[in-house]
Image: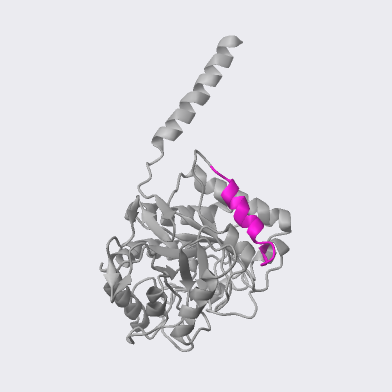
Amino acid sequence: MKLKYFLFLSCIFLFSAFSAFSQTPRKTLLSISEDKFYINNELTYSDRNWNGHAIAGLLMNSRMVQGVFDDLNPETVKNWIYADTKKWDADRNTDEFVTNMSVWKSYGLLSFTLNLQGGSPYGYSQSQPWINSAYTESGELRPAYFKRLERILDKADELGMAPMLGLFYFGQDENLADEKAVINAVSNVIDWLHSKDYKNVLIEVNNECDIRYDHAILQPERVHELIELVKSKEKNGYRFLVSTSYSGGAVPKENVVKASDFILLHGNGVKEPNKIIEQVAATRLVNGFANQPIVYNEDDHFNFDQDLNNFTAAVSTYASWGYFDYRMKDEGFEEGYQSVPVDWGINSERKKGFFELMKEITGY
């Protein structure tokens, strides 16, 4: 009996040792010091200045939330079919995303926002009858979503990129049964990320916490509780850096500012670039602000051919900026990164405008 028990324990030990040994060593470590981002302990865009503005330490990004998109509602999935195959294909969507990541990086894109409940596949929506959620009703993880996510995060680690992973999206959070399920989902995602040993992922608890969320813990007054939950889940001395975002033009509340490792802003609705500068200044005056990095990770304003636009305004006040684009009425497949099905290439004039300006600013 003792021999059997010894052999059993030996098998467990060998399996654990093999699993640890067989996991691919990670290449990318993201960190923050004061208001600056570092990748593998080196300042991003190291020593870079543009038009008299410091660029080193910023994190240029794009809203790519549909990278793991699927629709589990058989009544609406037909809305996302590819023109060439006449069907929707979630794996094709992720494959094409991964294929383009090295191209984005070549222009200086170091980060992009994904969301495990996506974003409106029309850009903006009043209702969301589709079901795009990486969680079951009780907050357990749906394996197919996380297989797709793993492909993206593995490629980001290989390329030295630092994705922002959003956990919830309004209009989809009601697919979770209750607050317990929300908490369970957060814990499960962070545990999964730790199990894969990623160290290049920023967490955005939810996209625009001040927009119609069903669960109180995802709303502005209490969302800091989930930020603190993420911060509490440490493994081997490492924890994930975390924040959440508000709607366009909003200045974050004190509870979120105090809890967050970095501050997320949105520029939607901010048509005058100087208002971007004012939004950043107001954020730095919020009680509890401790010189965290300020990052726009959603802004649907362009004018990239003009000297002053929302992108350059953010840069002028030492804030990182994130491009948000969707396919507008009567536009072709190549437009937008949020409209499903997505063309993940740089094939429209707006996309080219963003990437070319980013390349100029970052020096890539």
* Residue 229 magenta-highlighted: yes
Looking at the rendering, the stretch of residues picked out in magenta corresponds to 218-234
Q: Position of residue 261 (x, y in %)?
A: 52, 57
Q: Which of 252 and 300 lies nearest the eye of the viewer?
A: 252
Per the image, is 110 magenta? no
Q: Residue placed at 38% from the left, 65% from the top?
A: 58
Which residue ends up furthest to the bottom in the rendered image? 330
Q: Residue at x 54, y 65 (%)?
A: 70
Q: Position of residue 106 (x, y in %)?
A: 28, 65
Q: The N terminus lies in which quarter of the figure?
A: top right
Residue 233, quarter of picture: top right
Q: Position of residue 168 (x, y in %)?
A: 60, 63
Q: How is the image coloured?
A: one colour
Which image quadrant for residue 334? bottom left
**In this orientation, does residue 334 appear?**
no
Residue 3 visible within the image: yes
Q: What residue sits 49% from the left and 80% below the top?
A: 278
Residue at horizontal 46%, vertical 63%? 293
- Residue 218 in which image quadrant: bottom right
